[in-house]
Amino acid sequence: METTHYKIIMIPRFSNRETAGQQLAKQLSAYANRSNLLVLGLPRGGVPVAYEVAHALNLPLDICLVRKLGLPGHKEVAMGAIAPGGVQIFDRGLIQALAVSDEMIGHVVALERRELQRREQTYRRHQSAAQILGREVILVDDGLATGFTMRAAITAVKAQQARRIVVAVPVAPSSTCRDLQVEVDQLVCLHTPSPFSSIGLWYENFAQTTDEQVIDLLAAAKAHSEVENARSVKSV
């Protein structure tokens, strides 16, 4: 009996991060032009997506620095995440199941803290972080897998007393969306594929975003905001 072989072809939903951001912005149009709203991109890959959202909605852009804590020996597997202000989120179940020692965890945390500091100095330079207290915030990334980095970002902006928090991503597992949805005021996700394997499979071009690109996008967003603010003053 002849065996029939099937080849499953998955068509990427987004050509690149910029396209994903443009599509995401359409679902967030209700937030356009709000004076008390801030878009925060999670570096590095979330910043090109966040830039398109901020630009389309005429909103200011900044970054929310977070770092995944990779499992020792398997860095691609998240055992947690950290953010400035002492924020630490851990997958206690995974850590216990694999018997990851406190010493190993401490080493990874220290390493990623140094990277957070480096990025803070690199991206901000002489510019201070945007004020979050009392503002509405849209947290944007290029996708979610376990959701630990986004959970760290949520914890960080809550600690800074954001008035309202929205999470917006192009793609994520439905289980991660359900887990995060209870922690924020709104969660917007364009696609929740099942089964979910990796974020990169949902992009035709998923090249790593560089530090230079992040710096350039932040500068472009700042320039755009200054122009729009000047126009607003003239129209008054």
Image (cartoon, rainbow, N blue to C red):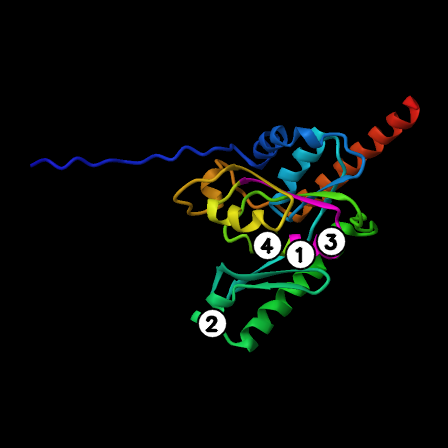
Q: As displayed, is residue 52 above or below residue 132?
A: above
Where is residue 113 drawn, in percent x and y? 66, 64
Whether residue 168 appears in magenta in the rendering, the answer is yes
Where is residue 235 drawn, in percent x and y? 90, 22
Decide which of tag 3 and tag 1 comes sooner along the chain.
3
Circle 2 residues within 10 Å: few <14, some 14–19, many ≥20: few
Circle 4 SS class: helix
Decide which of tag 1 and tag 4 comes sooner along the chain.
4
Indicate the amino acid at tag 3. Answer: Thr
Mark 1 in CB contact with mark 4 (< 8 angstroms): no
- Which labelled disc corresponds to residue 155? 1
Mark 2 in CB contact with mark 1 (< 8 angstroms): no
Indicate the amino acid at tag 2. Answer: Gln
1 vs 4, front mark: 1
The quarter of the rendered structure image containing the N terminus is top left
User: For the point 87% across and 27% down, which residue is it?
Assistant: 232
- Which labelled disc corresponds to residue 149? 4
Question: Marks 1/4: CA distance?
Answer: 10 Å
* Left or right: where 192 falls relative to 6: right
Q: As displayed, is residue 5 above or below residue 127?
A: above
User: For the point 42% across and 47% down, which residue is it?
Assistant: 197
Where is residue 54 drawn, in percent x and y? 70, 35
* Left or right: where 167 falls relative to 218: left
Is residue 54 in view? yes
Q: As displayed, is residue 39 above or below residue 150?
A: above
Magenta highlight range: 154-170
Indicate the amino acid at tag 1. Answer: Thr
Q: Residue furthest top?
A: 235
Residue under numbered circle 2: 96
Question: Marks 2/1: CA distance?
Answer: 23 Å
Residue under numbered circle 3: 122
Circle 1 SS class: helix
